[in-house]
Image (tube, grey):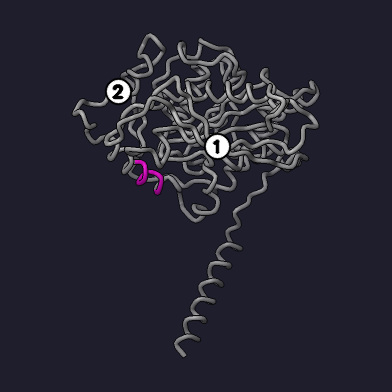
Amino acid sequence: MRRLTKISLLLLGVLVIAILIVANPALDVPAGALSQKYYLPGNHKIATLSVSWTDPSRPTMANHDFKGRESRELKGRIWLPADKKDAPYPLVVYSHGYMSQYKEGEYILDFLASHGYVAISVDFPLSNGSAPGGAVILDVANQAGDISFLIDQMLARSMQPDNALHGMVDGTRIAALGLSLGGLTTELVAFHPTVRDSRIRAAISMAGPSEFLLPRFFENSSMPFMYIGGTADAIVPYREHAQPITQKDKNSILITLDSGSHVGFIDMAPVFFRWFRNPDEFGCKALMYGLQKAQQAPRDGKPAPMLTELLGGGASGVDTTRSTAPCKAGEFAPAMRPARQHSLVILAIFSFLESQFSPSQTIRDEMHEYLFNRLAQENKDVVVSLGN
């Protein structure tokens, strides 16, 4: 009898979960004929390659009980078309956020690979969620160098006849893409006067901290730059970070997601956070715990330097006096469903990259028109603003 009761309760639990899933589907198809067309996966089958590379030229700093090492270890994955029909392909280098990991943007990289892009994402040595000594933000000052190293490796392997990447990567079509702290990494490798990589031709920051970046910071490069921000973001607030972008960079495009959240950008959000009023309520708790742990005194007792100082201060176009604390709001604004946010993010990123990198002038023009006009016309929770 007890066994029958347990089985009945188990079946009831499964039924309840099934009903919740059906009532709250993870997927969200965008509105409008063109948006639905461009949201379809591409014709390429997707292949993946695991990577575990070491940069012996740069050290990993000591971090609490971690003594550091003389190299930087980068482990992650490459997403690419399974064929070489249209090779060489554009390269996208993805940067993950604080306390996250390389698969954070997998939904984007899968989509791009199906449309003829090669993408790579790795765990950064000290900002990933499993970093030795605990994840720290300060190592972002070294992550632009990691991006340049990854580009070096991808281009070198594309030149090797016996390598799986042979002939796959187009060195003239390289983009940097990142979320949160990875968005700041993207901003640094695209624009910083001393660490920027001139091989990058387009950059996309999703909710990257930028409040302390001055207009002259963006004058170091005229590359096309897209920033995607959500108005319900409690971690990297829209008003301080996203909204000023078009006033700072005349070559920028700001994609505003009405009620977009910060956590809503990550790969697992549609599955795990679809029932949350705002996923950032959970994200803020995790972030503040991580920051509190990271701020504990290092082994040598010396105070940690300010991030803005590590980035070069005023000489680099970084204002050391501007720094709005994350998660300062007492209440969390209602957020759009993460699946909805994912669909809009994919459309914005894909149309932006295609408007820059498609080998067809016709497609570049079509995607430019879609991004600048039709995306917002078909999806009323999107606003597209241009730099001036």
Horizontal side of 166 relative to 322 (left or right) equals right
Residue visible at 61% across and 35% down in the picture: 78
Q: Residues within 10 Å of mark 1 (few under 14, many from 20)?
A: many
Chain-order first, disc 1 or disc 2: 1
Dot 1: element: strand
Q: Nearer the viewer, residue 141 or 316?
A: 141
Q: What kind of residue is marked 2?
A: Met
**Residue 44 placement (x, y as % from top left):** 76, 39
Front position among marks 1 and 2: 2
Mark 2, residue position: 306
Horizontal side of 251 relative to 64 (left or right) equals right
Q: Main secondary structure of the magenta part?
A: helix
Dot 2: element: loop
**Residue 55 placement (x, y as % from top left):** 48, 24
Q: Nearer the viewer, residue 49 or 381?
A: 49
Which residues are the magenta region?
282-287
Q: CA distance from mark 1 to mark 2?
A: 31 Å
Residue visible at 56% across and 35% down in the picture: 51
Mark 1, residue position: 257
Residue visible at 33% across and 29% down in the picture: 68
